[in-house]
Amino acid sequence: MNDDLLIQRLLDGTLTTAEHMELNQRLRDDADLRGHLREIAEQAVTMGDMARQRETGPPAASPRLPAKRSASTSWLALSASIALLAASGWLWMARRDAPVLTLIDSSGTVVWNHGGEMRVNVSAGEKLPEGTLETLGETTSAQLQFADGTLLSLTGESELSFSEERQKLLVLRKGSLSAQVEPQPNGHPMLVRTPSAEAEVIGTTFNLSARPDDTLLKVDEGLVKLKRLADGTSIDVPAQSCAVASLNSSLKLNPAVTPEPLTRWRFDFSSTVPPQIWRGIWHDTPEGGRILASPYVAQKTKDGAVVSHFGVSVRTSYLSPPLALAVTEKSIIRYRLRQDDIAPLQLMLLTNQPAGGFGGNFECKIGRDELRPDADGWCDVEIPISRFQAVDHRPHLRLRHPSPVGNIVTSFLLSSFKRDTGLTVAHFELSTLP
C-alpha cells in the first residue's frame, strides 16, 4: 500500500494493526513523510485555535489544507481525525519509555503496541509506556491504573490509546471503558476521545462506550463535559445521567436521567432485529427472525494461535435508548435455542459494578443432557443465577468478584466451544423466580 493511502486510512481510522506497524516503520525511515504528517498536525492545532476564537474573537486566517486531502473533507472532520491520531501516539515523535499505566489485572488476551513494538498477553503488574492497548475477545477485560490512582477498566473487544504528558489523553476507538478518575490538576482535565465525541473529565466516575455511529456516556459521580465532534456542540452531563453523542448532528444532544436497572426483560429475535454490534447473524425466515451464532476470538495462546468460539450476545447498552440489566439472587435466564449438532454450551455474564468499574466475568456450562429438543429441534433452557461461577480461578479475584448478584450485566454471551454447531436463538429473557 502506498504512503498516501496509508495516511488517508490513518486519518479515517480504518488502518489495521499490521498497517499501523507498516506506517510507523515508514515514518521512521522517511524524513519527507514525517514532515508531511507534521504539517498536517500543525494545521490541526491552527484549526483548533480557529474553533476557540469563533467564540472569543475574530477568526484566524484559514490554513492551507494539505493538497493530498480531498477538498470535500470538512475542517472539523479533519481536525478531529488528526486530534485522534496525535492523541493515539501514532505520530513520528520520539518514543517515550516512561511508564504511563500499570496493568493491575486482566482476563483473556491483552495486547500493547507502539511504534512497531508489540507485547502479546501483557500480564498483571506490567508498567506500560504510552501506546495502544487492545483487549481481544468479547470475554476479555483489563484493569489499569495511572500513577495518581485513576482506575480504568476495559471490557470486551476494546481498543484504547493512551498518553500522559501535561494531561491524560485517552482515545477509545471501540469498545467500553469504565473510569474512576481522581481529581485532575487545574486546567489539565483528562480527555477521552472516540470517533464521535470527546469527554472532558476533572474527577468523576463514568462509563463510556464507543459504538459504531455514536458514543454513549453514563456518569455515576461528578460531572463530565461531552462534546459532539460532528458539530462541536458541548453539554455538561451530571451524576446519575447519561447522554448520546451521534455522528448525526441533527439529533438532540441532551443529558437524561439514567433509568433504573431492570431485573426483568425479554428480547424476541423472531420479531425484532438486534443491533449489528451484537454477536451473531440475524436472518429472517418464514417462521420469524432468528440469530445464528458467529465466530469470535475467545483467546490467544502464547504462541499466537487464535482460539475461536461461536456465540450469540445480548448487550442492552447498545440499544436505543440503552438499557441496564441487573441480576439478583432470584434472577433466572431463559433461552429458546436449537443446534444442528447438539453439544454442550457455555453462557457467560460480563458484568460491571453498579457504581461503575469491572464487576467480574462469570460462566455456566450447559450439558448436553439439559438440551431436550422438541419435534422441531427447539430447546427451552432455564439457568438460575446461582449456577454461575467466576471465570478466573485465581483466589484473589474470586474473593473480589465472588458472584454476579447485584451487578450490571454488560453482555450475555451464549457459545458453543471451538466449533460451529449451528447454534440458533429465537428469544432471550431475564426474569426472576417467584
Image: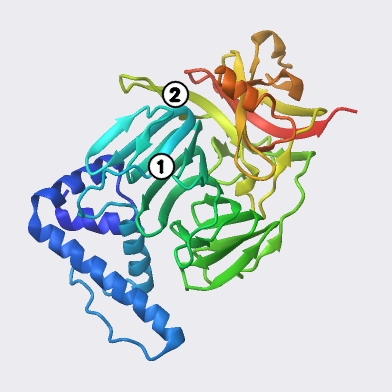
Quarter of the image for residue 17 reads top left
Where does the image place residue 425, in percent across and percent down from the top left?
64, 30
Where does the image place residue 296, in percent across and percent down from the top left?
46, 30
Quarter of the figure that contains the C terminus: top right
Q: Residues within 10 Å of mark 1 (few under 14, many from 20)?
A: many
Residue 339 appears in view: no
Where does the image place residue 183, in percent across and percent down from the top left?
54, 56
Against 118, residue 307 (above or below) is: above
Against 256, residue 310 (above or below) is: above
Please state if 73 lies on the left or on the right of 104 as rendered: left
Q: Disc 2 versus disc 1: distance between alpha carbons?
A: 29 Å
In the image, what residue type sits under mark 2? Answer: Ser
Where does the image place residue 354, in percent across and percent down from the top left?
69, 42
Residue ID at (48%, 33%): 104
In the image, what residue type sits under mark 1? Answer: Leu
- SS at badge 1: strand
Quarter of the image for residue 392 reads top right
Give the mark nearer the N terminus: 2 vs 1.
Answer: 1
Residue located beneath label 1 in the image: 101
Residue ID at (69%, 25%): 403
Residue 106 appears in view: yes
Residue located beneath label 2 in the image: 308
Residue ID at (16%, 45%): 25
